[in-house]
Image (cartoon, rainbow, N blue to C red):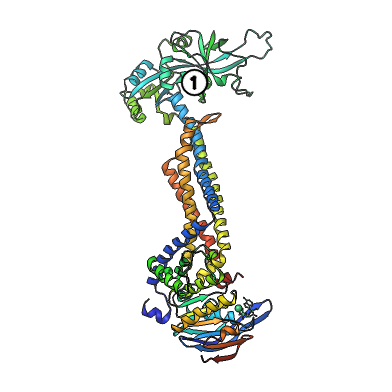
Amino acid sequence: MIKVEKLVKSFHSGDSELVALKGMSFEVPRGQFLSVTGRSGSGKSTLLYQLGLLDDPNSGNVIIDGIPVFELNAREKTQFRLERLGYVFQDYALLPELSSLENVMLPLLMMGFTKAVAKEKSAQALTKVGLGDKLPNLPSQLSGGQQQRVSIARAIAHNPQIIFADEPTANLDTETADAVLKTFEELHREGQTIIMVTHEEEYSRRTDRVITLSDGEIVSDILQKK
Amino acid sequence: MNQSKYRTGKISFKERIKHTVISIKLGFFLALKQLSRSNKWTTVLIIFIMTLTFLNLVVVSGILVGLIEGSVNAVKTRYLSDVIVSTLDEKNYIKNSPFVINVAKSLPWAERTSSRYLGSGTVEANYKTRIKDTDKVNSVGTIIAGINPDDEDVVTGIKSLIVEGQYLTATDYDQVLLGHNLLKKYLPIESPGFSTLSDVEVGDKVRIEINGNVREVYVKGILKSKVDEVSRRVFMTDTQLRGLLGRSDYNVNEISILLKPGSDPVVARDAMLASGVGQYAKVQTFEEGVPKFLKDIKDTFAILGNVISSIGLVVASITIFIVIFINAITRRKYIGILKGIGIHSTAIEFAYIVQSLFYAIMGTLIGVVFLFGFLKPYVGLHPIDFPFSDGILVATISGVLIRSGILFIATLIAGYIPAKIVVKQNTLDAILGR
Ligand SMILES: Nc1ncnc2c1ncn2[C@@H]1O[C@H](COP(=O)(O)OP(=O)(O)O)[C@@H](O)[C@H]1O
Ligand SMILES: [Mg+2]
């Protein structure tokens, strides 16, 4: 479970201060598929980076499974991200010189799994996202949608507690985007907690809950019946 | 994953060690992937630079030292031989020479000895064409050596140094050999302290003056050598010079002793001294006999070589630094992603260290093969022709190992620092490219 308490993040540029997150609080129960929407510049990405331990807020707390994560040092945060979090970036963020399989293997190897085990788990994850036949392909040999699914496989291979996705469908055509969302829905059905940023209502409609941001504040928080 | 960490997220010392071990393995994995899928020509170029650096490190000082080493070797083989017996400091000749020579010849290690009479004198050429007294005198001051031609050739191989004319035979009379540096045609340098004879050819008559005696002799041959004791001397048979010097006591000035292969000159010298030779003559091994200035220059050149090598090392370090820095900067986004998905900095830094070391090791290996497989034997067969020395390439295994070690350490640091700089950057900034 994730507990967000009075989270504030502001940016300074010159004399002016821009408050991107104006002290927001909410909770995400385990297994929820949450979407965060809002206009461009409303603070969606900023929120996701704080929750995903990629950035430090000015004040406020994020408590994940009872751990106040901002009290961890840099190394511990890295380890926390490694073991418990999974990321899907808008631009896939794959390493160009690694094959699909090797990209997915990376976090597993860092966790200390042997190469054989890492390979097996990675192959499973890739098969799950429908890329069982693309294991040796380099990112450059894959379409955008396929790359994004490798990225999802990398995010899920180590069974993280939470998956973060920042506009995972933004660069994809409707059909491919739909396939990616289906993958998320499938993971969600298996009990995976997912927090996805999207500005497309078509996709947020398919999640459990929609938090809408505007100017760094939550303007609506709607649980959806499905 | 132990329970307490699950509750707190804190990392124990034991876990840190574990992460480091994993990081090293993963660093290897990343480095291998990067190397094997990077541009082949870039890799080849970097390795080429490292090879040059290695050679620069070893060869520059190796040649500087080899220049003097070549000179020392020449002095040894062409003049001193293994053990050199010479006059005591205040004496004009070796007293009791027949006794000393006997001791030398009876050494169990002695292969052959060559005794030389020495006298200083002058050589004058073209004295017949000099009409007026005011004409410039065509003469040089020199040392005239009287040798037994056979002995001298066995000990120093002097016969092979003949470049014009013929070598002496034991029965030659009024025949001399001239060292090439006495002749203007070989040493076209005009300097007050270093005069030379002009227009002297083999077969010409020259006038030598020694010990008040003047003789007209024929130039039988010309010797070319980079050892002054050959190139600035005049050689004639010992029997004739003995007469000119009036040494009816058979006292000579130098005895060069060639030892059988594998003999220790120190042992031979000590045996000579034990026989009481010390009261008549100075006995030295070739190492002691080599002029001090050569030893000094050798040390100086070794330092100079190290200075030049150090500059090469700095250049190589900067090269590696730039290569790794550019590589890391252009991959900044990927480094950010790696950190983002939980790869520890140690693993990423290690990947760059492995890459730098790969370049250094490959460069060194190729350099070593080139050095010992080609360069050293080649320079050995075709010495570098310096005016005062036939330069060889001095490269010892231990010297190469030390220099390789220094190169590896420098490379390691030069690869680590830029990697560290880039890895240290904010993860999110790196991922987002801002
Ligand atoms: N590094 C930064 N420096 C300054 N301003 C920033 C930075 N990152 C985000 N912002 C600002 O914070 C606000 C929220 O940005 P962001 O979270 O990226 O919005 P969204 O993802 O909803 O489009 C925007 O006004 C943006 O310009
Ligand atoms: Mg955004």
Is residue A27 or residue A176 the one in the foreground?
A176
Q: Is residue A56 visible?
A: no
Left or right relative to A176: residue B94: left
Question: Where is mark 1, residue-wise?
Answer: B161
Front-lying residue, B25 or B75: B25
- Looking at the image, residue B427 lies above or below residue B413: below
| Neighbours of disc 1 within 10 Å: few (<14), some (14-19), many (20+) | many
For the point 44% across and 14% down, the residue is B149
From the top left corner, tell me how far across and down residue B125 is, in percent. 60, 12
Q: Position of residue B50 (x, y in %)?
A: 52, 49
Query: From the viewer's perspective, is residue A167 above or below residue B358?
Result: below
Position in image of residue B249 (x %, y %): 40, 11
Quadrant of the image occupied by residue B421: bottom right
Percent across and percent down for residue B378 are 48, 34
Read off the chain for label 1: B
Q: Amino acid at mark 1?
A: Leu
